[in-house]
Image (cartoon, helix red, strand yellow):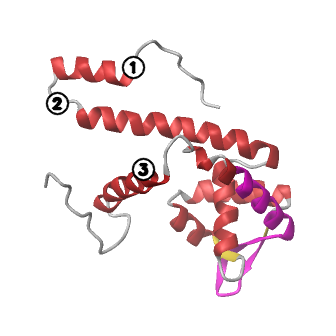
Amino acid sequence: MARALGLPFDPIERAGESWEQRFGPAAAMRAATSVFRVQQILLARFDEVLRPHGLTFARYEVLVLLTFSRTGRLPLKVIGSRLMVHPTSVTNAIDRLVAAGFVDRRPNPADGRGVLAGITERGREVVEAATGDLTALGFGLGDLPEAELDTLFQVLRRVRLGAGDVAGVEAAPSAEG
């Protein structure tokens, strides 16, 4: 798990107070810093749950994506695009999944230079077990009620859309805009 800080104060709130005294409004800084800290917490929680399955969260995401695909196989460049990661990261994850017996690799018949990654039966079994454990954990967000999870998704989605994550879709204006 992410190391609990155990501080007698909220360091992000304290930084926000200092920020306001020195630079001005701190709401955006506090929110962004909180997102980064929550990411650390979630990744630590995921790693703890996935480690017994021989997975990291990045490798788990690849297996889930392959599970969702119609044929259980996808080109490596499609995996990278859908997971929004660099091709080197995809290759590394696939190499490790192949070594674990969760994925196999074969030439892409539609692209002579491309490679298809396919989930194996063993990979399907591990993704089912790992998904059960992550679901039981509430994907690390078990501290929040369902309605707040939906709100959090919508708020973060606006940031993603504003950054162009989905072509042709713009973020809805905020309540203030």
What amino acid is labelled 3 in the image? Glu
Alpha carbon distance from label 2 to label 3: 25 Å
Q: Which residues are magenta?
A: 105-133
Q: Is residue 143 above or below residue 83?
A: above
Judging depth in this view, the residue of 118 and 148 nearest the camera is 148
Q: Amino acid at mark 2?
A: Pro
Q: Earlier in the sequence, mark 3 or mark 1?
A: 1
Instruction: Please give the residue where the numbered disc 3 appears in the rendered image.
Output: 148
In the image, residue 118 lies in the stretch drawn in magenta: yes
- Residue 25's disc is 2
> Which residue is tagged 1?
11
Q: Secondary structure at mark 1?
A: helix
Residue 93 placement (x, y as % from top left): 69, 55
* Residue at position x 23%, y 22% in the image: 19
The first of marks 2 and 3 along the sequence is 2
Three-letter code for the amino acid on which mark 1 is drawn: Pro
For disc 1, the neighbor class at 10 Å (few under 14, some 14 to 19, many from 20) is few
